[in-house]
Image (cartoon, rainbow, N blue to C red):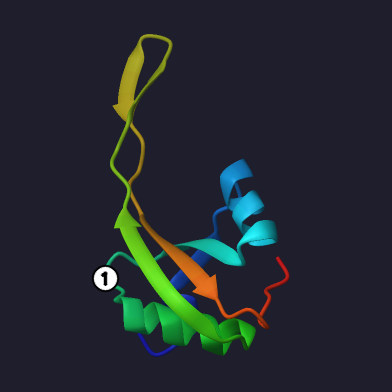
Amino acid sequence: MKNYADIIYSPVVTEKSALNMQDKNVYTFKVNKSATKTQIKKAIEQAFGVSVKSVNTLNTKPKKRRVGRYTGMTKTYKKAIVTLDANSKIEL
């Protein structure tokens, strides 16, 4: 994974993540499942030109969903919760 686009897929924009962006300077991204915290930190710094304070990661679990009589599971992905330094900010 040499390019940051191979690690960072997309931002996660929910009500909770939007509040964290405004209040706590914390951003949430969908990332590659095999990416490590240090790789994610370098990719965020390279992509957005900011200073990263910490990175927390978690793997989401599949959830059961039903559409009519058909049942299935949602997709899983790795989520990175990135805390930036006080003077850094990302425009999404």
Figure check: 74 above or below 38:
above
Q: Pinpoint residue 4: horizontal percent, then vertical percent.
A: 48, 82
- Report the quarter where the C terminus lies: bottom right
Crowding at mark 1 (Cα within 10 Å: few <14, some 14-19, many 20+): few
**Image quadrant of residue 68?**
top left
| Mark 1: secondary structure | loop
Q: Tell me the residue at 43%/76% (across/down).
A: 54
Residue lying at 48% horizontally and 69% vertically, measured from the top left: 82
Name the residue located 61 percent from the left edge and 62 percent from the top edge.
24
Of 49 and 77, nearer the camera is: 49
Q: Considering only vertical position in the picture, is 92 above or below 90?
A: above
| Quarter assignment of residue 78 | bottom left
Q: Is residue 81 left or right of residue 85?
A: left
Task: Please give the residue where the numbered disc 1 appears in the rendered image.
Answer: 34
Q: Is residue 49 above or below residue 61?
A: below
Please give the count of numbered marks on the rendered protein: 1
Q: Position of residue 48 (x, y in %)?
A: 62, 82
**Direction right: furthest residue:** 91
Residue nearer the viewer, 85 or 11: 85
* Camera-nearest residue between 16 and 6: 16
Where is residue 74 drawn, in percent x and y?
36, 36
Q: Amino acid at mark 1?
A: Ser
Give the quadrant of the N terminus. bottom left
Residue 29 x %, y %: 50, 62
Q: Is residue 15 left or right of residue 36?
A: right
Residues 85 and 76: in front is 85
Residue that lies at the very extreme toward the top in this rendered image: 69
In this image, 74 relative to 23: left or right? left
In the rendered image, which quarter is residue 61 located in? top left
